Every structure is written in structure tokens, then in C-alpha cells.
Image (spheres, coloured by chain):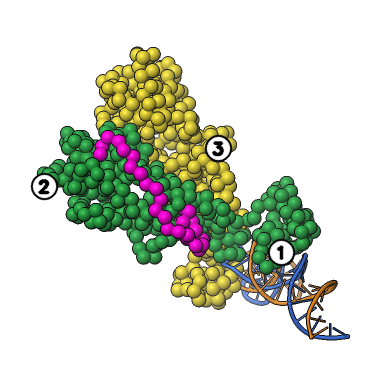
Chain colours: A yellow, B green, C blue, D orange
Amino acid sequence: MQVGDRRATLKDVAAASGVSPTTVSFVLNRTPGQTISETTRRRVEAAARELDYAPHGTARALREGSSRIVLLLVEELGIGSALRSFIAGMRSELEAEGCALVVHPVGSTPATVERILAGVRPRTVLDLTRPYSLGTEGSDGGWVDGMAAHSLTQLRHLIQAGHSRIALAIPPRTRQSATLEARRGAAQLAAARLGLETLREVEIGEEPAAARRAISDLARTSPQVTAIAGLEDETALRTLAAMAELDLGAPEDLAVIGFDESRHSAIWRPTLTTVRIEAEIFGRRAARVSLGRDPGEWTIPPSSIVRRESA
Amino acid sequence: MQVGDRRATLKDVAAASGVSPTTVSFVLNRTPGQTISETTRRRVEAAARELDYAPHGTARALREGSSRIVLLLVEELGIGSALRSFIAGMRSELEAEGCALVVHPVGSTPATVERILAGVRPRTVLDLTRPYSLGTEGSDGGWVDGMAAHSLTQLRHLIQAGHSRIALAIPPRTRQSATLEARRGAAQLAAARLGLETLREVEIGEEPAAARRAISDLARTSPQVTAIAGLEDETALRTLAAMAELDLGAPEDLAVIGFDESRHSAIWRPTLTTVRIEAEIFGRRAARVSLGRDPGEWTIPPSSIVRRESA
DNA sequence: ACGGGCCGCTGTATCGATTTAGCGCAGGAT
DNA sequence: ATCCTGCGCTAAATCGATACAGCGGCCCGT
């Protein structure tokens, strides 16, 4: 299985099959423009299998100029479900192309990211935490824009439930990212398209007291607002928490809807109505884009309302 | 700043400072056992700065046998606060040693991890998701055992509040990991040390109905139980949710305490009393262990009760 | 006066894979 | 008979950094 105590190299496979390393490389990579006899090919493949040969990623990366790693930088995991499916899609597409996906959560430290880049030399980096810039556009396979498209789904549900004055609950400025910023814009765009006036934005931060104040301000200054759309589930849940402390019920006093179903949405009291997004296709697209392939058709992936108590 | 359109290499620095690449390497790495004249050293350093030279991680990794990356595999992020501080500690310690930390959340796919290992060739891999094995012991800088130690803090709080019959809420078997399994054992150990009988374990899964059943079973078959300790905040919150649906209040009917403060614990209704753990020192230790350094003194990091409504 | 050792530095091999140039041979075209 | 082409394969260079052996020159001890 192994040569000495180390992993088998190309050279070992070459020695075992009685050809040169070059030939082994040609065989295993199916290098186009190279003709290899059937018998040789089989001998090499057998030897590679026998020795359990796996290409040495680092050596390859040195030669090729970059590793076959794609680095995905995210803020955090465990929040929404869409990111999970995005990652799953991206991963499976990348693996089919011989690449691996590394997901790294960033605590907003550019210097640290630099270090990782220097050490890994990824083929591509997809940074979902960066402010939305022209450079990134499209390179995320539609993640940012695609997520935003589902604001329509979210608002439409509220409208169908009879609401026409709607506020938008947004996370604190400290958590800004490409995804959130674009989604905020998209929510306003969706509102306009649905004939609503500009949504009043309510910042719901980590601090319970501040959140409470934001909600009571809203109730006082805009009593005609009957529903709140959260930019993400987390924000919607904080909204519900603040409302509960103000003795406001959902949906009676204010309907609340989340976005991008989180694990807590089902067990909160009241349970949170939200939007579930299957982002796998965006993940696949992002993978193809990052490898320079044709992204294929633009499709908005299925999104659906998870109907619960709060709206 | 750059040579051509590519990043400067050692050779470029050598050419710019009129010495050999070997010398440049000696200077920049402060290779022990090599004497370099002060003037040469300065010339080389100046050239390196001038050209904005940064070592090529891949080339180095090829030569050294592994990259200067340490890979930390976790289940998910955004759950507890201890993991965050653990990562911060590990990161800063590693960076001081010229290494970078990559944190990758695993969706339980060993084949995918294999791909990453082949592509990155990390110096070390620290897998917190793996079942606790002898091989891992200690390599986590005390993470697993250290976390477990705080079960004492948790149970002691309940005892001080007058409880003596305590149940342990555990996550579903599907989420088992080194951390959770060790913590479960440690909770029982802590119970024994505090003179409690073996804690009855209640599995609180993702499914609300099942969780409800588990709680009502507990109430029916062990009415003497007056408090529940959660193996993690997530589990404790699910417990509170199930209790609320059964019209059981915390702490009146059953006191509930969490473990490893999560972001939701403060905004749940009722707010969750829990244990906050500063795991940064474990992160530092884990970093040192993974680089083969002396881990230093074993210290139990500070943990404290975050006293809220539920217990 | 001669051997040994240290200083300050260089040349070269090496890590493992890929790529380019090219070699010997067979078969077909001219 | 000669030239050309394509097949099947190999030798050597390359990617960038590091490790090891070693080279001249100088100083020191005996």
C-alpha cells in the first residue's frame, strides 16, 4: 500500500509500473493531446490503485500557481438554513471538478485572512462578508441577488394576510455584510414593486433595552404599521422578544415574519413564520463561476413560506 | 514593489540585494547557527521590504512537508460563546508562531475532509467533532476536559438554589461529538462529586413533540426532580420551549440552567440562566500543543454563572 | 609554520507534480 | 528511396523555498 512510511508519490507509481513519472502523470490526468497505449494505461492505473496513490496537493499547487481549494469566507454559521444549502451545493459541484471547499468564518480580521491566503493559495476566494462591490457581482453564483429576490416572497405573504403598512427590522450596523446590505436594498425594491411605500427601517440590535425602545418608538410614531418583516430570522426573533416585553403579541398587535429559516424559529414563543430558501443551486453556480466555467441558466431557486403563528 | 506582474520571490530579493537566495532565506528566517554580517542583513531586509516580499506558502509547505496552517474542524459556529473565545485564543497564539488558523465547519462528511487535508496539508488538524478518543486527548489544549470541568459550576448553582434532584437534558444522539460526549460524562462525574445521585438523562431532540413527551415523561415518572441542567444552551432552550407548551414555568415548576452562553439565552422567555466560559486560554494551549510546544501550566479558565430568570 | 576552527556566504539537491521538447519507430505519402 | 506524420513514451526544466555540504579567508594555538 505504501512505500516506506510515507505516502506513495508519482515516482513510486512510475517505478511500480515500469514507466516514467511523466507517463504516469499523463495517464492519471488524462492529459489531452497525449496518446497512451491501452496496456500501459492499465498498468499505471493498477499500480496507482495498488499503492493507494493520491496526488500531492502542495506540489501540484506549487506547479499550477494555486491550490485546488476554494475558500468561502462567511460571517458565521448556524444561523440560516440557506447558507447551509448554498455550501452543500457549492461543495458537491466543486468536488466533481476535483476541488475542495474550505469554509472559514471570519471575525472581521483582514490580516488573518491574508495569512490564510498566503498559506493556502486558494484557486478562488468567495467572500460573503465583504461589502457588496462591483467586483464581486455574479461571482457568488447569485447568492446575494438570489437571496434578495425572496424578499418578494416574504412581503407578499404579509400583503396577502391583509397588511399594507410594513416596517423592516434590520440588524445592527455592526453586523453589516454583502448579504445583509443587498438584502436590505432588495427588500425596499420589492416593497416598491408591490406598491408599498418605502419601508420604515427599525434597527434591532443585540441590546434588549435598545430593541425595546426601537419597537415602542415604532408603535408610537407609526401606529399604522401592522407588520414587521425581519431581514433575517435572528432579527425577527429579537423583535418578538422585545415585543413580548412590551406586552405586544404577534400577530395580533404586530405580525412578524422572518427570513431564511433558522433552527430557533420553530421553538420560539410564538413560533415564527418565515421564508425557507433552497440555495443549493446558487452554491452550484458559485462553484462554476469560481472555476471559470459557464454558470448556466439563471434560475431563482424555490422559496416557500413556513407558516407558523407570528404572521 | 513587484517584479513583472507577479509577487516578488526569494530570488528577486536576492538579486535586488546582491546575495544568494540562500542568504536571503537565512536572513529572513533568522536561521539558527548561521552568522550573517550586519550590513548584509540590513541590505536584505531593506530589499525584502522594498519588494514587499512575502514567502510563498505553497513552496515552503512542499519543502517542509506541511503547510503552516492548522485546521480546526468544528460542528457549527454561532452556538456557544466558549468556542468563539477558544478560536480567538488559538488564532492569536498560532499567529505569533507564524501559523494561520483555518476553521472549517464539517457537515459530517469524512471524504470531504480528506480532500481538504490533501489540498491544504495542514501542520495539524484538531477535530472537535470526532468522538473523544485517546489519540486526541490533550491535543485540544484542554478544550474537552476544560469545558467539562465547568459542569461543577453549573450544578453547584442549582444546589445552592436548593435543588437536589436534578435531571440532565442532552442533545439528540445525532449530534454526538467529542465535546458533548465528554461533557455528558463530566456532568455525571460532577454530580457524584457533589453528592448527587446519577443524573437522569432526558434527550431533547429537534422535534418539538418528542421533546414535549420527554419532559412530561420526566414530570410523571420522576416528580421529585426540581431542576434541569442542559448540556448546552441550545438544549436548555428547547427544554424551556417544551415546558412552555406543557404550561410548566421556569423556575417555579422546574428550574432550568444552560451551559456555554449563547446569543439567544438572553432574549428567550424566560431568560436563561447559564454558564459563561472564557476558553481563550484553552485555545492558546491547543495552539501550543499542536505546534509541539510546551503547553504550559494547566489552568482552569474563569467560568461564571450568568444569572437570569430560569434558575 | 602549519593545522584547526570560525565567519560569512554560495552552489546544489530536494520536496512532488506538470510541462515542454524531443526521441525512436512504424506506416503512409510522394 | 525519401520525407513526413503520428504514436508512445522519456528526459529535463520548472514552480519557490529550504537544507546541507563546502569554500575562501582570517585568526588562533602550538
Q: Can you give x and y, in whole percent of width and height, for residue A155 in the image? A: 37, 24
**Segment tinted magenta in the rendering:** B283-311
Q: Quadrant of the C terminus of chain A?
A: top left
Could you tell me if residue B287 is visible in this image? yes
For badge 2, the amino acid type reads Thr
Residue nearest the observer in this picture, B268 or A294: B268
What amino acid is found at the position of numbered circle 3 in the picture? Answer: Thr
Q: Is residue B287 magenta?
A: yes
Chain that bears disc 1: B
Q: Chain of mark 3?
A: A
Left or right: B171 with respect to B90? left
User: Which quadrant, please, contains the N terminus of chain A?
Assistant: bottom left
Q: Is residue A164 above or below residue A270?
A: above
Q: Position of residue A7 (x, y in %)?
A: 50, 69
Name the foreground residue: B197 vs B117.
B197
* Residue count near mark 3 (Cα–Cα under 10 Å), binned few <14, some 14–19, many ≥20: some
To the question of a shared chain for discs 1 and 2, the answer is yes
* Residue that badge 3 annotates: A136
**In the image, residue A262 above or below residue B138:** above
Q: Quadrant of residue B17?
A: bottom right
Callout 3 secondary element = loop
Residue plotted at (57% across, 74% down): A19
Q: Chain of mark 2?
A: B
To the question of a shared chain for discs 3 and 1, the answer is no
Instruction: Name the residue tied to disc 2.
Output: B221
**Residue B127 seen in render:** no
What is the C-alpha distance between the residues marked 3 and 1? 40 Å
CA distance for labels 1 and 2: 75 Å
Q: Is residue A215 left or right of residue A47?
A: left
State the separation of the CA atoms marked 3 and 2.
58 Å
Q: Which residue is mark 1?
A: B22
